[in-house]
Image (spheres, rainbow, N blue to C red):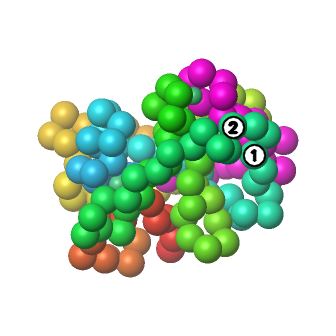
């Protein structure tokens, strides 16, 4: 089983699955959202995911004009899991505290617009844009 939480611990979740693949989005929206080189996530089916506590403390923000939305703890501001699509959640990889030992980066998206100081050094496959080549930045949607 996989467990995770935000920085203050108010929001906690569990996943009944062995996770292995991490997706990293390097787009400018994810960069501003995290203040870093992007965001690393894992994608899990809704039925394998459950909230342990704090779901009522989660705030969300959707960027106008873009297919992009973020979910975060309203107490500490940490990114927390959100809706990838109707059937799957995305989980910020950095919020996983237990059960993530096999995690490895398998895909990088929006590499074509990554920060100049962002050097990718792992074996993950690099994609210039999103998988489907959407003209929009798709920070919240990972699918092949
Ligand atoms: Zn928190
Ligand atoms: Zn992004």
- Quarter-of-image position of residue 48: bottom right
Report if the CB atoms under discs 1 and 2 are less than 8 Å apart: yes
Q: Is residue 62 above or below residue 114?
A: below
**Ligand number 2: quarter of image:** bottom left
Q: Could you tell me which quadrant the N terminus lies in?
A: top right
Residue 81: percent from left, percent from top? 59, 48
Which mark, by number, is residue 51? 1
Q: Determine if the C-beta at disc 2 is less than 8 A from ligand 1.
A: yes
Mark 2 sits on what residue? 54
Seen at 19% across and 34% down, the residue is 117
- Bin the neighbour count of mark 2 within 10 Å (Cα to Cα): few under 14, some 14-19, many 20 and up: some
Q: Which residues are magenta?
A: 1-23
Query: Observer-nearest residue: 54 or 41?
Result: 54
- Which SS class for mark 2? loop
The answer to whether residue 28 is left or right of residue 138 is left
The reply to whether residue 109 is in sight is no
Q: Determine if the C-beta at disc 1 is less than 8 A from ligand 1.
A: no
Seen at 23% across and 50% down, the residue is 28
Q: Is residue 143 above or below residue 43?
A: below
Query: Observer-nearest residue: 96 or 33?
Result: 33
Residue 3: percent from left, percent from top? 75, 36
Residue 6 in magenta?
yes
* CA distance separating discs 1 and 2: 8 Å
Residue 112: percent from left, percent from top? 21, 58
Seen at 59% across and 30% down, the residue is 6
- Which SS class for mark 1? strand
Residue 22 in magenta?
yes
Judged from this view, the residue extending furthest toward the top is 8
């Amino acid at each position: 089983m996989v467990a995770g939480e935000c920085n203050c611990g108010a929001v906690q979740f569990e996943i009944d699955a062995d996770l292995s693949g991490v997706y990293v989005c390097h787009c400018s929206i994810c960069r501003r959202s995290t203040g870093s080189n992007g965001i690393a996530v894992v994608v899990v089916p809704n039925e394998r995911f459950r909230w342990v506590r704090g779901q009522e403390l989660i705030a969300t923000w959707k960027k106008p004009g873009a297919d992009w939305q973020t979910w975060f703890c309203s107490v500490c501001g940490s990114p927390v899991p959100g809706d990838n699509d109707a059937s799957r959640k995305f989980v910020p990889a950095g919020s996983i505290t237990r059960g993530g030992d096999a995690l490895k980066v398998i895909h990088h998206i929006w590499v074509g617009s990554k920060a100049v100081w962002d050097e990718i050094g792992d074996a993950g496959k690099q994609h210039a844009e999103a998988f489907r080549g959407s003209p929009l930045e798709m920070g919240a949607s990972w699918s092949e």
